[in-house]
Image (cartoon, helix red, strand yellow):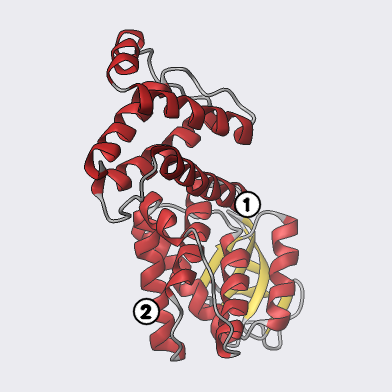
């Protein structure tokens, strides 16, 4: 049996579970008339999820003080849909982080405040599956709450989903997205081009830059390509030189070494992009 540890409201309780220790239970009238130590039959709870971290539990309790229960229910349903879609359990912080973010985003939208997201496109290119899931959530919220959420907000939602899937800090993911956007600016300036953001070569370059950053941060480096490096240096000196400039920027921002072999892959991506616009 499951025993009540703390009543959060009539429909949400924190309980002691025989297999998961503490869990958050959700069900209509679940907490009504209950007190600490009371038993709750498992079939009474419509939903449950685990919040192992005490800090996450505290944040969730605070969340319930200002977020409507109906909105909590919508978000929990969608978080369950994300887990089913990707076939994995999400980092528990999404119950707090994404719910809180969207609650205040919707308030701003209702007040007529615009949502700016200069990195939306880079986010869509880097995390297409998460972005598609975010689009689903926006459509769901439109149907449930009759509200039109602007396109820029989809990128922010996608980052929350990616953070929960990858168990990576949202601030770190945001920094990486901004870093990629900055690198694209450097490329346009140095090659004196305006990149067509719909070009397939641009899509490949953005994804490659994100993968490079991930590899550098995890120290999962590529194999050496010494012979190919010399050929590219001779054949494509402009793009080869630029690749090293980009690598130095990444190294400074990430505070980790970027392996020399990365010059080969970057040069190839840059040359393909440069060829389409020159």
Q: Position of residue 33 (x, y in %)?
A: 71, 88
Residue 4 picture quarter:
bottom right
Residue under the image location 43 percent in, 28 percent down: 243
Looking at the image, which residue sits at the far top?
A: 227
Numbered label tally: 2
Residue under the image location 63 percent in, 66 percent down: 96
The answer to whether one can see residue 117 in this image is yes
Question: In the figure, is residue 237 to the left or right of 63?
Answer: left
* Res 171 label: 1
The answer to whether one can see residue 4 in this image is no
Residue under the image location 37 percent in, 70 percent down: 135
What distance separates the C-alpha of mark 1 from that of mark 2? 26 Å
Residue with the mark numbered 2: 139
Residue 228 picture quarter:
top left
- The image quadrant where one finds the C terminus is top left
Question: In the figure, is residue 247 to the left or right of 36?
Answer: left
Instruction: From the viewer's side, name the closer residue of 132 and 82.
Output: 132
């Amino acid at each position: 049996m499951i025993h009540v540890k703390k009543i959060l409201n009539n429909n949400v309780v924190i309980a002691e579970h025989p297999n998961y220790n503490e869990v958050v239970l959700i069900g209509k009238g679940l907490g009504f008339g209950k007190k600490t130590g009371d038993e709750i039959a498992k079939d009474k709870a419509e939903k449950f999820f685990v919040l192992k971290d005490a800090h996450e539990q505290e944040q969730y309790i605070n969340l319930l003080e200002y977020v409507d229960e109906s909105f909590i229910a919508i978000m929990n349903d969608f978080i369950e849909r994300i887990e089913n879609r990707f076939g994995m359990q999400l980092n528990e912080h999404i119950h707090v982080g994404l719910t809180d973010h969207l609650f205040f985003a919707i308030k701003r939208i209702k007040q007529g405040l615009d949502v700016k997201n200069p990195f939306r496109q880079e986010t869509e290119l880097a995390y297409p599956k998460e972005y598609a899931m975010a689009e689903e959530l926006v459509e769901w919220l439109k149907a449930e709450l009759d509200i039109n959420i602007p396109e820029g907000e989809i990128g922010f939602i996608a980052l929350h989903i990616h953070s929960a899937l990858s168990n990576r800090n949202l601030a770190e993911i945001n920094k990486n997205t901004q870093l990629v956007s900055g690198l694209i600016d450097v490329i346009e300036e140095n090659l004196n081009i305006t990149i067509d953001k719909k070009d397939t070569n641009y899509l490949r370059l953005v994804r490659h830059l994100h993968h490079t950053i991930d590899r550098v941060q995890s120290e999962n480096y590529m194999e050496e390509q010494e012979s190919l490096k010399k050929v590219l240096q001779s054949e494509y000196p402009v793009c080869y030189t630029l690749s090293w400039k980009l690598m130095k920027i990444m190294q400074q921002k990430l505070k980790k070494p970027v392996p020399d072999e990365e010059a080969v892959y970057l040069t190839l991506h840059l040359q393909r992009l440069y060829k389409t616009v020159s």
